[in-house]
């Protein structure tokens, strides 16, 4: 199934508006909640299969369970990766395991290119304009220069990048994939099986606290051996987290009472 121009435009808009590293307010204010998992179903809906889009987005999310932004620099661009990979699976019939293997290098390359985008050059214009507005005491102009104008240009740039990638990239990628030997594709599939393990390992390393590991293993074994659904596990996790918070607050109150005495 070929992707239409309208679908390419809609997918590009989704990426530009819901990208986790920027976007128009108020969407940009909730970027911590915008992941490939949370917006992939929209791309799937544009392509006629929102469930498959959600599954693909969740699978790509496991590559890096905790994408970290340090000093404004991200490690991977899973959003762009999902934007390209979901059409490959739904429209071009690429196997999802191979798609995840392709998504990993795409996420790294896209992130590297994103850090050197030309929009950063406009910062040389924003800063003097912002300083001038602040000196004049014009807070409306300062708000416009520091938030609205950068967000609009940043979103427009991301739309163009996504449009070029989806319009030309998916077709080119599909041609390349058709030329790849089956044995190599099987290797991609095997490598993709390791991606979730790497993602979970990074997640545990980021937590860095041994006292939280039992919760992780309880959830894993409940899914593996008890056959519980992820929704049930999520509810159990919320309950355990709530109990943990109550116990911690109770311990803090006790310590304060002892300290006061």
Image: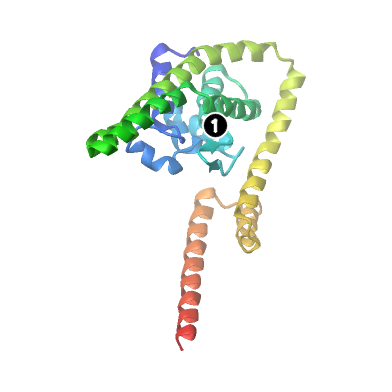
Residue at x 52%, y 34% (from the top left corner): 57
249 versus 109 height, above or below: below
> Mark 1: few, some, or many residues within 10 Å (few <14, many ≥20)?
many
Residue at x 45%, y 85% (from the top left corner): 260
Q: Quadrant of residue 215?
A: bottom right
For label 1, the SS is: loop
221 versus 92 height, above or below: below
Q: How many marks?
A: 1
91 versus 50 height, above or below: above
Q: Please say whether residue 228 is visible from this viewpoint.
A: yes
User: What residue does disc 1 label?
Assistant: 77
Front position in the image: 92 or 9: 9
- The colouring scheme, among rainbow, by chain, secondary structure or one colour, is rainbow
As drawn, is 31 to the left or to the right of 144? right
142 versus 235 height, above or below: above
As drawn, is 140 to the left or to the right of 83? left
Residue at x 37%, y 41% (from the top left corner): 29
Q: Please say whether residue 48 is visible from this viewpoint.
A: no
Question: Residue 153: x, y in percent?
Answer: 37, 24
Pick out the residue farthest to the front: 135
Residue at x 45%, y 23% (from the top left corner): 121
Pick out the residue farthest to the bottom: 261
Question: Residue 126: x, y in percent?
Answer: 36, 29
Front position in the image: 3 or 19: 19
As drawn, is 193 to the left or to the right of 230? right
């Amino acid at each position: 199934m070929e992707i239409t121009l309208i679908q390419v435009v809609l997918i590009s808009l989704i990426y530009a508006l819901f990208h986790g590293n920027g976007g128009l307010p108020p969407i940009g204010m909730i970027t911590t909640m915008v992941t490939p998992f949370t917006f992939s179903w929209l791309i799937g809906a544009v392509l006629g299969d929102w469930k498959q889009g959600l599954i693909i987005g969740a699978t790509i999310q496991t590559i890096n369970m905790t994408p970290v932004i340090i000093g404004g620099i991200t490690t991977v661009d899973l959003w762009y990766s999902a934007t390209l990979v979901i059409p490959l699976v739904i429209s071009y019939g690429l196997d999802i395991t191979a798609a995840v293997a392709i998504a990993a290098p795409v996420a790294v390359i896209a992130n590297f290119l994103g850090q050197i985008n030309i929009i950063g050059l406009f910062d040389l214009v924003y800063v003097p304009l912002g300083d001038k507005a602040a000196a004049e005491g014009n807070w409306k102009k300062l708000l416009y220069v520091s938030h609205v104008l950068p967000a609009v240009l940043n979103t427009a740039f991301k739309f163009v990048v996504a449009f070029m990638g989806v319009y030309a990239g998916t077709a080119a990628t599909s041609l390349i994939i058709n030329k790849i030997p089956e044995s190599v594709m099987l290797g991609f599939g095997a490598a993709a099986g390791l991606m979730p393990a790497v993602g979970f390992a990074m997640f545990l390393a980021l937590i860095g606290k041994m006292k939280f590991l039992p919760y992780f293993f309880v959830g894993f074994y409940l899914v593996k051996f008890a056959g519980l659904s992820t929704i049930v596990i999520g509810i159990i996790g919320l309950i355990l987290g709530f109990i943990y918070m109550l116990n911690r607050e109770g311990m803090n109150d006790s310590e304060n009472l002892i300290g006061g005495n």
